[in-house]
Amino acid sequence: MTSVNTIVEVLKRLETLYRPKVEDYIALNLLKPSVSDFEFLVGVILSQNTSDKNALKSLNALRNGLGGILNPDSILSTPLEKLESLIKSAGLAKRRTKTLIALANWFKENNEVIQKLRELEPKEIRELLTKIYGIGLKTADVYILMKLNKPTFPIDTHIRRILSRLGIFSTTDGYEYISSVVVSIFNNNIDSLKKLHILLIEHGRKVCKAKKPLCTQCLLNDLCHYYTAVKQGSQ
Ligand code: SF4
């Protein structure tokens, strides 16, 4: 099976297996129309290097601590120490607070760009966002795909691990290469890209864990290079 066919088959099988819960994924949880772009990005920043549950807890604490109004002004008018304390349950509070302030300043200073953001190509939006302190490719891509409904493919550690174990990509392939290949395989189909993103994370959390993957229970094991190597005793 070619890599193209494998990844399409992976999505097909994972769709039959999982029904991800909104409360387990911050990017799904924040897809309500009432959530602003700024708030969505704050949520994704809070989820960097921590669980989505911790991120949601932090986001709620932040929103409540700011009197229910989470926007650039409320962030910029709050003392640094208070912000750090409100988001502490997500960890890395000092670094994250610096990112939230940088994001708030960017929103305040780039009103015209923000109004036209939806007209830009994913690559252009990525370039703008990744200039902000603490915002990397994955954070930008989660926002571009999930909130702006534009074709890109955000890759986290679960996704990278599974795609390399399956043999679809190598461990040395770069983020932008993997992301652009996946987007082209799914022919810019937003729905498929969103599903693949969430379902691979679900599979990484539940089955294809970093340590001791549950290969014998995995419904992808007949497609998987890692499992073939394990069976042959070479891994
Ligand atoms: S067979 Fe094992 S390594 Fe391969 S995808 Fe499944 S859990 Fe991961």
Image (cartoon, rainbow, N blue to C red):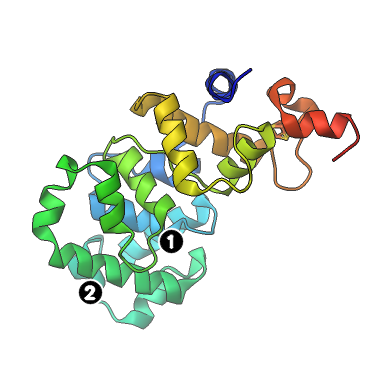
Q: Secondary structure at mark 2?
A: helix
Question: Label 2: which residue?
Answer: 76
Amino acid at the residue labelled 1: Ser
Q: Is residue 30 left or right of residue 138?
A: left
Amino acid at the residue labelled 2: Leu
Tell me the residue at 48%/36% (across/down): 197
Tell me the residue at 67%/32% (across/down): 166
Residue 152 placement (x, y as % from top left): 37, 38
Q: CA distance from mark 1 to mark 2?
A: 18 Å
Q: Is residue 207 visible?
A: no
Tell me the residue at 47%/70% (across/down): 88
The residue closer to the viewer here, 120 or 52, is 120
Instruction: Tell which quarter ligand 1 is in.
Output: top right
Q: Is residue 172 left or right of residue 148?
A: right
Question: Label 1: which residue?
Answer: 58
* Mark 2 residue crowding within 10 angstroms, few (<14) / some (14–19) / many (20+): some
Q: Is 196 placed above or below 86 here?
A: above
- State if disc 2 and disc 1 touch (CB < 8 Å): no
